[in-house]
Image: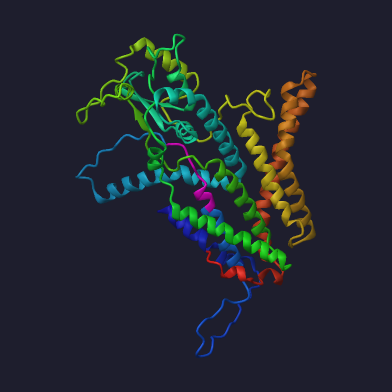
Amino acid sequence: MDCFISWYFFLLLPIFVPRACGLRTFRPNCGTPPEGVGFVQGVNIRSTLDIVWGCLFTLLICTWTVQHLNLPPRRNNLSQDEEQGKLEKCQAWLSKRWHKAHPRMKWMALTIVLPELLLGKAYQEYIMANRSRDKMRQFAQDDGVEWTKMHGFYANMGGFALAVRGTREGSEKEYVYLNANTMWLARGSRNDGSNKNLLLCQLPHFTEADIEDKSKGDFFIKATAFIQVLWLVIQVIVRGARGLVISPLEFAVIAYSASFFITYLLWWSKPQDVRNPRILRLDEIEAEGRNDPPKKIDAGVQTDPLNEIGVEVRDDALNKIEGERSDIFKPPPNDARYDNAPSQFLPNAAGLTRMDDGIAFGGVVFGALHCAAWNSPFPTPIERLLWRVASVVSAGMLPLYYLILLCDIHTSRPRLVKQILSVLELLAIIVYILARSFLLVEMCRSLGFLPPEAFAATWASEIPHV
């Protein structure tokens, strides 16, 4: 409940800020139309809140829509006691809803602060999904099943889990989450070409249609986000063509939208909001490989899928998989870095991945689009200068940081040189954070100092939007 109250006051904040800051306000006075008028057009001006709500809604709906999170960890099903009071049931319901919404809200906040991080994550997963499709192509043909880029995305988000006998003390049964690479290890061929003593003798029969059925992406929300972004782009283009003032906030939201658009294209084939994995049981997979119907299992009773291959083979296979993952009993974390996808531009830099390439590219795109507000009105000349400097720093600092890092990794010079490079790396990060923080603050502060031309409306205001 506290969360909803906080959001309510956040939405009401723009109404009280002008009075709190002592800003002069202007309320247009439009008369009512005479009798007999059948159609009334909108006013030829826009208010400060029109700018705020249009940009804020665009930012929030895009930030919500672009999220394609990995599967959450499985929760133990808590039995509902019939004797529980209404308060306990309400608390349990709120806890369940919060557990479901919390990761998405956390990543939404992180995306608003660092949109390039999400773009880097999407680029890494796109490369890994393509690589999985290529590596699994022969296995998929041999097994007569599908394995596309969508399957690679689905596997890397924790979509496949193998039911195994408990490997830890006190556990009867556990689920080993297989990403695309560990599934390739589990399905790998022996030297003699046979499938004997493999953890997976057959890839699961799981089509793209099955994956899409698990995906819960809302078409209406996505369409609304697309229309809202399209409206904002048209609004900015029309205002620019007519020589009208465009606020820094509008340019900033355009930069966010461009970053989200690239991210969404990279995640085009990734399922969204999947809650439960596809549980793999070896008796069912083996039956598929023999074209036999799977064994029927009594309700509430599950067979041990690893009786057929033996404990030694299981342990050997699980050790290989565990070498690829820090915790194979949980889905991959949303910030997972796949070291087997090394950086394309810095392939010899230890620890740098395609995610770093995407982050650097995202920073360039985001900062460069802020430069579009180069000549926008600002409260003071010094703030205009700081905006220009911060935009250039945002666009160029991340590539510079990775260049310094590359020199630090490969240099064999004296210790003093390496210490200087380490200091430069730290300074680059600090300067980048300060520049991004200034852009966030200034795009909001400048709204209180816009010239009158910024409030002139255009025909783009008639396009349906929020």
Question: Residue 104's x, y, as percent?
Answer: 47, 44
Furthest-bottom residue in this view: 35
Q: Is residue 39 above or below residue 453?
A: below
At 49% from the left and 42% from the top, the residue drawn is: 68
Q: Main secondary structure of the magenta part?
A: loop
At 31% from the left and 23% from the top, the residue drawn is: 173
Q: Is residue 226 above or below residue 244?
A: above
Residue 152 belongs to the span the image colors magenta:
no
Question: Residue 21's x, y, as percent?
Answer: 64, 65
**Residue 78 versus residue 357: which sits nearer the camera?**
357
Question: Residue 379's x, y, as percent?
Answer: 74, 62
At 66% from the left and 62% from the top, the residue drawn is: 236
Count all numbered tags in the image, as a single digit: 0
Please give the range of residues in magenta.
62-71
At 65% from the left and 54% from the top, the residue drawn is: 252
**Residue 55 versus residue 41: which sits nearer the camera?**
41
Q: Quadrant of the N terminus?
A: bottom left
Examine the image and state in which quarter residue 244 appears: bottom right
Question: Residue 193's x, y, as percent?
Answer: 44, 12
46 vs 434, left or right, is left
Examine the image and state in which quarter residue 410 appears: top right
Can see residue 336? no
Can see residue 424? yes
